[in-house]
Image (cartoon, rainbow, N blue to C red):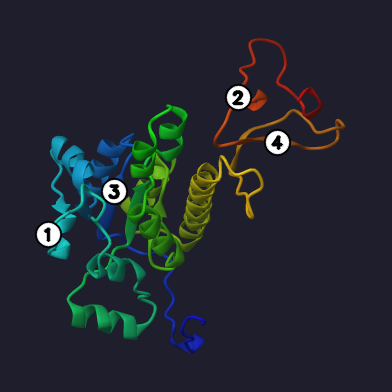
Amino acid sequence: MSGPQHDPSLYRDRDQVAVRRALISVSDKTGLADLATALHDAGVEMISTGSTATAIRDVGVPVTDVSDVTGFPESLDGRVKTLHPSVHAGILADLRLASHERQLEDLGIAPFELVVVNLYPFRETVASGAPENDIIEQIDIGGPALVRASAKNHANVAVVVSPADYVRVIDEVATGGTRLELRRELAAEAFSHTAAYDASVAAWFVRDVKFPNTFSVSVRRENILRYGENAQQEAALYRQQLGNGIAQAVLLGGKEMSYNNY
């Protein structure tokens, strides 16, 4: 089964997208106050969930609870917050298509041009030695759905999964809107983020299986090395997201390590 096909001539160009409405739901609150303040100063309406909404209000920035948008309360100890058509239709609508624009109008749903989400700290909870039930509660469901939906629709929506990207997004919002080039970069990072997250969850579930049918490994670049096996070659060091090893070692003195040092 495949997705719907549209005549290419029906798509309208959308390079720079002005940001009028943002959905923010973050576990890591780093930089949130500055982000919310900058978006408010740029005239952006913010929709948020739970503790994120509280943190935004605490710095004096107005924000709308997502339950006011969906007409449905956050439920099941926070397991169900953003899993609602009023949220996902506003993210997934491809406004290059007049038909999608009309459908949103008919449904009374406003689009989102910016989605800021980072996921529950699953890996950190595993590393802390927490009991199994606590680890399972840190398997994010709504967050990855928001991230993937936004990244799929990067023609219309900028998705941000890392506080490290806040400044450049704020700069573009303040100067008229996000560029397609940036939205593509953010979408690539977003899909990498959710893929790594799911790989860590899958690896945890098969941790006691001797030979699982599928073994997912999530690795992240730790640094760029001085050179590869030979001086004219380039190399980088990647480490697994779960577990410990030499890649986590701290260099106390001397030159930066090369490929052969590892």
Task: Specify which label sits upstream in the sequence, 2 or 1.
Answer: 1
Q: Residues within 10 Å of mark 4 (few under 14, many from 20)?
A: some
**What is the three-letter code of the residue carrying label 1?**
Asp
Which residue does the numbered mark 3 point to in the structure image?
25
Task: Specify which label sits upstream in the sequence, 4 or 3.
Answer: 3
Percent coordinates x, y for residue 202 in the rendering: 52, 49
Which residue does the numbered mark 2 point to in the structure image?
248
- What distance separates the C-alpha of mark 1 from that of mark 3? 15 Å
Numbered disc 2: secondary structure: helix
The disc placed on residue 236 is 4
Residue at 48% x, 80% y: name it: 3
- Compared with 231, 190 (above or below) is below
Q: Nearer the viewer, mark 3 or mark 2?
A: 2
Mark 1 vs 4: CB contact within 8 A: no
Q: Residues within 10 Å of mark 1 (few under 14, many from 20)?
A: few
Numbered disc 4: secondary structure: strand
